[in-house]
Image: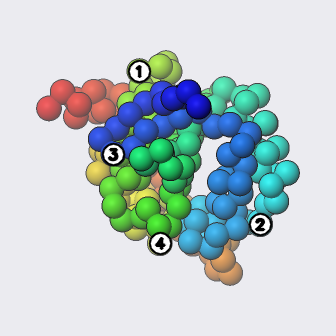
Amino acid sequence: MADTTVVSGDRVSLRPVERDDAELLQRSTTDPEIRVPLGAPKPQNRNQATEFIEKTVEEGDNIAFVVEVDGESVGFVMVEIRDYGRPELVYWLLPEYHGQGYGTDAVGCLVDYVFRTVDCHGLQAVTFDFNDASRGVLERLGFSREGRLREAAFVDGSYVDVLRFGLLRREWDAAQSD
């Protein structure tokens, strides 16, 4: 199989999402350790995951990659391109890869790729207040907390706060030149 790596970080590589990745993406809606922090409201079957790939990845302007560690598919990163406002990051890793720095490396690779290839002034991301790991990834990459939406999402049986983060291109560029 040909190497389809688009971006390489210190510990991860990013490659385009393929339809064969539907099983991996399906896990984000079925595994509670991923589904709850993402706020995925209901499980998806493989056909629904394939439909997500077709509509969200293949047909739109979004930029999506599978995260690989040593050739193993371990997660997903995407930037949703919008007609208004900043593009928004979406990301997750399989639970067995949490807490090892792979998320920061993968999201950092995505941010760098987007700022090199997309004409945008900045990026945004949202996370739930209880998701310390996601908040840590964003803060380590230089994102600033820009707001809190109180009890804005119903997740796993209760209302939770949603935190909004942002990063401007000039802030990323300054941090990369240090």
Which disc number belongs to residue 12? none
**Where does residue 159 sit, x and y in percent of width and height?**
62, 75
What's the residue at 50%, 67% (across, down)? 95
| Tags 1 and 4 touching, CB below 8 Å | no
| Tags 2 and 3 touching, CB below 8 Å | no
**Is residue 145 something that shows in the picture?**
no
Q: Which residue is identified by label 1?
A: 116
**Where does residue 144 sit, x and y in percent of width and height?**
34, 48
**Is residue 78 something that shows in the picture?**
yes
Q: Which residue is identified by label 2?
A: 42
> What element does badge 2 sit on?
loop
Label 2 and label 1: CA atoms lie apart by: 35 Å
Label 3 and label 1: CA atoms lie apart by: 20 Å
Q: Which residue is identified by label 3?
A: 11
User: 85 or 23, which is in the foreground?
Assistant: 23
> What element does badge 4 sit on?
loop
| Amino acid at pointer 4 | Phe
Mark 1 vs mark 4: give the one in front: 1
Residue lying furthest left in this view?
Answer: 178
Label 2 and label 4: CA atoms lie apart by: 19 Å
Label 2 and label 3: CA atoms lie apart by: 32 Å
- The quarter of the picture where the N terminus appears is top right
What's the residue at 72%, 43% (across, down)? 20
In terms of sequence position, does the residue under pointer 2 or pointer 1 come before the other? 2
| Amino acid at pointer 2 | Lys
What's the residue at 79%, 60% (across, down)? 44
Circle 1 residues within 10 Å: few <14, some 14–19, many ≥20: few
In terms of sequence position, does the residue under pointer 2 or pointer 3 come before the other? 3
User: 158 or 14, which is in the foreground?
Assistant: 14
